Image (tube, helix red, strand yellow):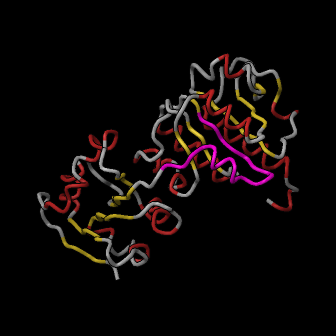
């Protein structure tokens, strides 16, 4: 059974890791990160490779989440607090009434992830994506369309930030990823591993619907606005999504979803889904 711990006071020292979540999230140096919401908690418990340290629930969420928290290890404390106490600890109104604390593990290496991919593999690469919503949405798309891993350069935001995890519907917690280096380093690693690289750009030389995906394919996305740098585009196959004239471009996560879906659906008969 879970270790339920009533915590009726905001100054309870056991709640210190949850204190002022919004301000601490981006600068945490304790090897921990926060997961928020019912869906993401379920994925953290059932499908994540990250250890759960503790859970903080509003009293009203205890019964609806009983089946989820019952699957936690007995040593994981489940702090149960009035909503007002939870809000005071977190520093904002936690309307979902669910916060969990998880521990980071050793970061994956891009080369190792690519080496472990099978003869038919799909990789999503993110270069310079600093918006947590977009990164979270890209992970959700990658999981939905069967990408084997996500690579992020050092200029992209941390996918284990609370908001990115929430927008990803928790798929960040179960999708292999590596973060670090430059976009050029990413292209080098993909090339060494035998991947063909498609870089999405409004001015891409090839139209996505005209392309047949190779067995080992990486789809690379750049930040909205600046997009991918010219030197990186020159080292890849630049691909455009044909859209209606007069529309500047698509949201980066939407563009990535279309490209990932094309790669998946072009490879498999419709009967396989």
| Whether residue 144 is situated above or below residue 63 in the rendered picture | above
The percent position of residue 127, horizontal first and vertical second, equals: 58, 30
Q: Is residue 13 left or right of residue 22?
A: left
Residue 91, horizontal then vertical, whole percent: 22, 47
Question: Residue at (40%, 48%) from the top-left corner?
Answer: 162
Query: Residue 236, located in which quarter of the rendered image?
Result: top right
- Taking depth in this image into account, of 63 and 217 the one nearest to the observer is 217
Q: Residue at x 22, y 53 (%)?
A: 87
The boundaries of the magenta stretch are 107-126
Looking at the image, residue 26 sits to the left or right of residue 227; the answer is left
Up-down: is 264 above or below 7? above
Pick whichever, 6 or 250, lies toward us.
Answer: 6
- The residue at 40%/74% (across/down) is 72
Work out whether 145 lies above or below 156: below
Quarter of the figure that contains the C terminus: bottom right
Q: Quadrant of residue 57?
A: bottom left
State which quadrant residue 123 falls in.
top right
- Inspect the magenta stretch and tell me whether residue 120 lies in it: yes
Query: In the rendered view, does 148 fall on the left or right side of 135?
Result: right
Assign the N terminus to one quadrant of the image: bottom left
Task: Residue at 19%, 55% (x, y): give it.
Answer: 16
Q: Which is more toward the observer, 53 or 87?
A: 53
Q: Nearer the viewer, residue 180 or 253?
A: 180
Residue 258 lies in the magenta-colored region: no
Instruction: Give the x, y percent position of residue 131.
Output: 48, 33
């Amino acid at each position: 059974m879970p270790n339920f711990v009533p915590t009726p006071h905001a100054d309870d020292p056991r709640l210190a890791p949850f204190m002022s979540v919004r301000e601490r999230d981006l600068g945490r140096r304790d090897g921990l990160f926060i997961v928020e919401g019912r869906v993401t908690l379920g994925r953290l418990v059932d499908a994540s490779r990250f250890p759960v340290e503790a859970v903080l629930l509003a009293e009203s969420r205890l019964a609806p989440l009983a089946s989820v928290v019952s699957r936690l290890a007995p040593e994981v404390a489940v702090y149960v607090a009035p909503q007002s106490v939870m809000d005071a600890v977190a520093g904002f109104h936690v309307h979902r009434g669910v916060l969990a604390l998880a521990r980071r593990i050793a970061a994956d290496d891009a080369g190792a992830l690519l080496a472990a991919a099978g003869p038919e593999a799909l990789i999503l690469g993110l270069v310079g994506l600093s918006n947590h919503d977009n990164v979270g949405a890209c992970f959700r798309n990658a999981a939905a369309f069967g990408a084997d891993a996500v690579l992020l350069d050092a200029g992209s935001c941390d996918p284990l930030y609370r908001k990115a995890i929430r927008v990803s519907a928790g798929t960040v917690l179960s999708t292999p990823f590596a973060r670090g280096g430059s976009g050029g380093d990413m292209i080098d690693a993909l090339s060494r591993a035998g991947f063909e690289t498609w870089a999405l750009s409004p001015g891409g030389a090839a139209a996505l619907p005209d392309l047949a995906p190779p067995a080992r394919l990486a789809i690379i996305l750049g930040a909205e606005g600046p997009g991918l740098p010219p030197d990186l585009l020159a080292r890849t196959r630049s691909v455009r999504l044909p859209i209606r004239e007069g529309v500047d471009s698509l949201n980066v996560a939407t563009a990535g979803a279309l490209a990932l879906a094309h790669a998946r659906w072009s490879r498999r008969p419709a009967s396989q889904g």
